[in-house]
Amino acid sequence: MSEEKNQERFIAFGLFLLLIVLLIPLLWISKYNVMAVDDYKYLNIAWNGSYEEEQNILDILLAQMKNAFDCWKTWQGQYFANWSIMSFLALRGAENYFFVTLVTLIPLLSADYALVYVILRKGFDATLSQVCIAVFPVMIYHLSVPASLVEAFYWLSGAVTYTTVYAMSLVSIALLVNLLFIYSKKRRFASYAIVLLLSVCMGGGNFVTGLFMFLVFFFFAAYAFVSRRRHRLFYLINLLIFVMSFLLTIFSPGATNRRIENKESQISAAKAVCLSLLEAVKYVCTWTQPFMILLAAAMLPLFWKLVKKKKYRFPLPALAVLFGFGVYAAQFTPNQYALGILGAYRVQNIYRFQLIFLLLGNEFYILGYLHRRFPLLKFRLLEKLKKVPFITAAYGALATCVVFACMCYYAKDTMSSISTYKSLRNGSAKKYYEEYRERVNILEDDTIEDVVFIPYSCPPYALYFGDFQKSYNWVNEDAAQIYNKNSIRIQ
């Protein structure tokens, strides 16, 4: 048994080192990150004179609440996302834009760990090494192959609205599951407060995560009442608060204006649901790549060991799989209903993030059912191999190498760590930042009223989202207002 624990520690430590190696270039390149597109509009609103720079942090945050309310009335209803973006720009400014990566990556990785830790550690008595073996591949997947790297971790407007809010959803689920194992009053009420706060925030985040979390909260409330579990009243109150918060976003004047603008693209709700199911099937079939199947295979021994520790029933596996897929497909519905398409890459990042949980979650549940249905079933070969010193570690290392090689082959230059490393090594990231600083110097020159820029010479894949336009455009206009220029355009 001690030899087996040592092997698990060895695998966990190896995966941790791999995670750090992949994370370093993502963090390193963030120092060359700069503002783009919608950020100018948010900065323009944040600096609308509602506060002075010498005011304290609380005054600035309160001032941005008023600005977020104005956006809610006129532009879009995502009040928490708007407030977060404008507060960041008001507090940190364009000079500290590299912090964007921290406010997206840290919440996402922390949420991954919190969710897997609670489910495996509290629910299945997993050791810390086993939790790490399960969660580090999920983190590596989330870091390595988002649908769009810049929209996931570097572009403030998209990253906060989708990636950070998505991380909140994982933390909320972790806290709700953890409530089933908490008996201390202080810890219980602390969890209540955090979940309620996150519910209000997610209600004003984005429509994709909002609809997903409505189904999750509804499931927890229904489960608590049917099974007569504890916290029934809290689950119900939390569901009602989230619904009210989410409805504030759905029926905001700003959201209504945008629906009117996109009226021709809208379809019926029933058709949107059907298309969402179809698109979800296509998305799962398209993006369940070989490396994900290899990863699922590598998890078989660990998952089988964990499901044997507890005598859970794991009832109706087919229904559980269909329910999980339905919740996953619900994320496709808002964009199908409003636009009839999958949505921008920042939206598809969430589809991609959730896919790994859908795959591994179904695998875990089915293995639990198989163990309950066939309790004498064993992986006899694996049981024998465990007795050979460090064979499990060798197997884990080999599986990691194969999965990583497949990820490199699949993603190629769009794989996050490879792309950022290349941009750092060939100097394109540094050159991009230097050209941006040259532009700022021109914009801060009061003697120049009409500004004409040349395009960026080598915008890096990881950082570049968009630029000014050749002619009149709202991005150009917002930047011109910030720097008191008559006009800004690209040559």
Image: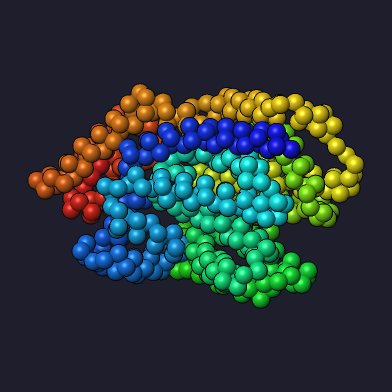
Residue 451 horizontal/vertical position (percent): 19, 42
Which residue extends farthest left? Answer: 447
The residue depicted at 57 percent of the width and 48 percent of the height is 112
Q: How is the image coloured?
A: rainbow
Apparent side of residue 5 relative to residue 164 in the rendered image (left or right): right
Quadrant location of residue 408? top right
Rendered view: 467 above or below 431: below
Image-quadrant location for residue 400: top right
Q: In percent of the image, x 63 and y 42: which residue is there?
A: 129
The answer to which of 89 and 331 lies nearer the viewer is 89
Q: Can residue 379 be seen in the rendering of this structure?
A: yes
Q: How many labels does the image show?
A: 0
> Where is residue 261 shown, x and y percent of the image?
46, 58
The quarter of the image holding the C terminus is top left
* Quadrant placement of the N terminus: top right
Q: Is residue 19 left or right of residue 299?
A: left
User: Which residue is drawn at the image coordinates 51% and 31% (left, top)?
Assistant: 415
| Residue 104 x, y percent position in the rendering | 45, 48
Nearer the observer, 451 or 4: 4
Q: In this view of the protein, which residue sits in the foreground, 230 or 465?
A: 230
Left or right: residue 155 versus residue 369 is: left
Q: In this view, does 430 lie above or below 243?
A: above
Return the residue found at the far front. 2
Residue depicted at x 42% and y 28%: 421
Q: Can residue 319 be spotted in the picture?
A: no
> Where is residue 252 drawn, in percent x and y?
47, 68
Position of residue 472 in the picture relative to residue 413 (left or right): left
Asked if residue 148 is positioned above or below residue 87 in the image, the reply reads: above
